[in-house]
Structure formats: structure tokens, C-alpha cells
Amino acid sequence: MNGRTLIAPALILLFLCLAVAARAAETPPNIIFIFSDDHAYQAISCYGSQVNQTPNIDRLASEGMRFDRCVVTNSICGPCRAVIQTGKYSHKNGFFSNGNRFDGSQQTFPKLLRQAGYQTALIGKWHLETEPQGFDYWKVLPGQGRYYSPAFLTPDGKQTIPGYVTDVITDQSLAWLQDGRDKSKPFMLMLQHKAPHREWQPGPAHVGDLEGVTLPEPATLFDDHSGLTQAAKRATMRVLEDMREVEDSKVFDETSPYGRQLFELMTPAEQAAWTAAYAKENADFLANKPTGDERKRWNYQRYIKDYVKTVASVDDSVGRVLDYLEANDLADNTIVIYSSDQGFYLGEHGWYDKRFIYEQSLRAPLIVRWPGIVEAGSVDNHIVANVDFAQTFLDAAGVASPDDMQGASLVPVLKGKTPEDWRDAFYYHYYEGIKNTHTVGEHYGVVTDRYKLMHFYTLGEWELIDIEKDPNEIKNVYGDPAYADVQAELHAKLKELREELDVKNNTPVIQ
């Protein structure tokens, strides 16, 4: 056998490999965006959670990139969703507060992907009040939706599906992947959960978890907000004073109005699981009726356990999606993203809910798996944001981003590179205001790696937080002479960002 005989097969094999690689490079990746509601990063074990384990979300992180500094533009459900659709801040997309109606005629990333040949689908929570546009298929919860026997809005009318909402949304999504799409086209699926939104109703598979377990309390559960402004003191989202005993803490039985309403949506097996999970603790509570600090601790334990049990079903959903992709030879060419609309307080500052620019509200989880592109198990600390998502999806799909989008594609960061012009500061703006639920004052601010400067403009208050020295964010140093230079620099940066983003001085106050 001569050398020419050996070389020829090797060249043929090389050319075949190159051809396969070229075809793969030309195939746009599929995109699955798994989006939960109010899922705090501190309730995900790969983020160091002290209260629960999330093995399937952790699996995604071990196979992709975990972002440790993903922030949001306006920490409330509907506005965050509008930002993701448009790649624009609230003042540009027109959706400032829950209860607004999204202008579906405007440019969105699903419309642009669809024009580029993607098949697009949206299943689950929408919460933008108008019919979805830019999707080949959609099935969405009306408003917040409900946990048991959820109703869905579709182009053909309303449909009620028995079961637990997280499981149902996952079932419907996998059914669309299996039988509902055109398999000759790349796809973009937005799988959007209701969970773990208030009132934190666990599913039948997990409602009995954590019996007899006491979960750790956050360091600031008993924060009295004495080091902050009136904005923090007046917020009505306190674990002790503002949680509803029946709905939030589940102190009811099947004969109460809330219990009857909920149990009517359940199967007998689901009813039995709930009764078994709550009966003994409720009886003990009603016999003893704790007060003061003891009651706050009881409320916290009931809240945090219900919350993480609700998260458990979301984690199950992530595992089912990943398993489906593996079983159907889709994993290698599908980008899987896990995120939440914003962060959430799990007792920090004595609170639940979100809205503030403080860390647990501002910061959202973000995990991206992109085989062959993203280094498995990598961690990123750039300041990234939900306003970047639209441009990221478009860039990953090879679609040009419109000039009027206000974020930046994360694709270079996902490839391990740092763009020279990447942001070193971020602008935040919450509009809903003191006349609305939870009475959190309207505010805007600037966030850097170390500092936060915020202006509660309807209350006439400023705060400056040194995150490095005060990671729990309990001391306002605005006006402290030691921070005079930092304060001046942050004021200048805030002014610069507002001008760059075209934020008008006549900022609307949402009534």
C-alpha cells in the first residue's frame, strides 16, 4: 500500500468532517427560554441557596454559564416581560406598571425571529393584557393565572386543563415540541411559568415536603430599616404585618371560603395531599396563636417552605425539558436559557415581594446552556440585564438587531469575551409608586459593581449604598462627607445614563 492510497481516504474523511461542521454552522440554533415568575436567585442551589436544592437548574448551570450579576430595569412582572419582548426600557416600550396594556403592534424580537424563518411559540404566563403577537402558536394564562386547573387563552378561545399549572405548562410545551411545530424550521419557545408567584401554592408532588424542617432565617429578617429612608420604612410587604393569614399562610380548611374555592379546583388526591400537609401545623398554630417575634418567625417558616416547595416543581420542569432534548437529539443545537422576571425577597429586610433597587429585588437568575459555544460550568460577573435578552436571541440566531434596542447582545460574553465598551453602570427605574400595592415609592438609580445611588423622587429622598462595606444594604451613606467624591461621580453617571437612554424629566407617575 503506497502513501497515496493512505492519503486519499484521510482527505475524504477530512472533507466530510468539514462539510458536516459547515452545515452545522449554517443551522441556526433552536432557543428555549424557560422563564419563572418571582424566582429569587437565593432560592437556587447553584447560586448558594441556604433554603433549597434545585438539581435540574444546577445541571443546566454545570453545562452552561451562570450569570452572577444579571439585573432588571424595573422590578415588577409585566414591565420586565415588556422589556424582554422589545429590548427597550419601560419609558420606550410604554409598559410602566402591572395593569398597563402592551402595545403589541410594536417591534419585538419574536416578530423578527419569525421573519427570519423561525417558528415561534409562547406557552404559560404572559401578563401583558393584550393578545400575543409574533408567535406561530400561543397558549397563555389570563392575568396571573391560577395554580390548580388553570385556564388558558388561545386564538380559539379559553381552555381549562386539569392539573397543576407548572406541570400543565410543561406538558403543553413538550407536546408542541413533539407534535405542534414544523420540524424543518428552527424554533424559539418561550416556556413561561406562573410559579413561584404569590400565593405560593405547592404542587401535589411537593406539598408534603419539609415536614418538621426549620429553614435558616436571613440575617436581616428583623431589620427595622432605621438606617434607610422613609421609602423602606413605609413599604407594606412585611412578613409579619402584611401577609394574609388565610391565603398566604394557608391557615384554612376545606370549609372556609378560600379553602372551598381552592379545593373545587383540585382532584380528591390533590385535596388529600394538601390536607395532610397543613392540618397538624395549622391546628398547633390556632391553639397557640403566636405573637410578636415568634409570629414573625412562624410566618417566615410557612412562607419560605411554601415558596421553595413551589420552586421544586419549576425545577422538575427544567429537568423534563432537558431530558426531552437529549432523548430527541435536540440538545446539541438548542440554546436553553433559565431566568425569572425579577428577583424576590425571601425575608431579607423582613420583606417578601420585589420592586426596590435593593439587591434581592434588582438581581435575577440567568443561566445559559449553548453546547459548543458556552464553556460548561462557567461563571460570569459582568453587569448584564433583561434589556439585553432580545438582542442576544437575535444575535444567536444570526438576525441583525434594530438600532433602537437599548441593550447589548450577550453572545460575546457567552463566548468568553469582554467587549471593550461593556457597561460599568446600569440604570434602574421603578414607576408603580406609593399609591399602589406595597406602597414602594417611585424611584430611579444607578448601579455599579460597588455602589447604588437611588432617588425616591416623589418622596424627595436619596440613598447611597456601599455594597462592599454594607452587603446587607441597611445603611444609607448619602450626604456622608466620606462619600462626597463617590456621590458626585454617581450623580454624574446617573445624569449621563438618563440622557443616553432618553429618559425624560417629566417621568410619569403611575396612579
Image (cartoon, grey):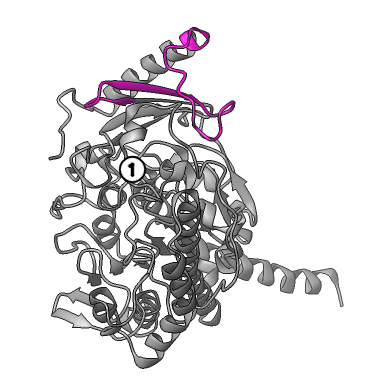
Left or right, 428 with reference to 25 = left
Q: Is residue 233 visible from the viewing direction of this image? A: yes
Q: Quadrant of the N terminus?
A: bottom right
Q: Position of residue 344 (x, y in %)?
A: 42, 50
Identify the residue at image location x=30%, y=65%: 117
Q: Position of residue 105 (x, y in %)?
A: 13, 53
Main SS, magenta region, reads loop
Q: Which residue is mark 1?
A: 355
Crowd band around label 1 with a 10 angstrom C-alpha radius: few (<14), some (14–19), many (20+): many
Towards the viewer: 486 or 297: 297
Q: Which residues are magenta?
A: 455-484
- For this orientation, the residue located farthest to the right is 1
Q: Is residue 441 above or below residue 316?
A: above
Q: Is residue 460 magenta?
A: yes
Identify the residue at image location x=57%, y=43%: 219
Q: Is residue 426 above or below residue 175?
A: above
Identify the residue at image location x=55%, y=64%: 57
Q: Position of residue 274 (x, y in %)?
A: 42, 81
- For this orientation, the residue located farthest to the front is 287
Q: Quadrant of the C terminus?
A: top left
Q: Quadrant of residue 188?
A: bottom left
Q: Position of residue 47 (x, y in %)?
A: 59, 52
Secondary structure of the residue carrying tag 1 is loop
Task: Identify which amino acid the numbered label 1 is placed on.
Answer: Arg
Q: Is residue 376 magenta?
A: no
Towards the viewer: 254 or 191: 254
Towards the viewer: 13 or 344: 344
Left or right, 336 with reference to 95 = right
Q: Is residue 443 above or below residue 492?
A: below
Towards the viewer: 338 or 277: 277
Left or right, 409 with reference to 81 = right
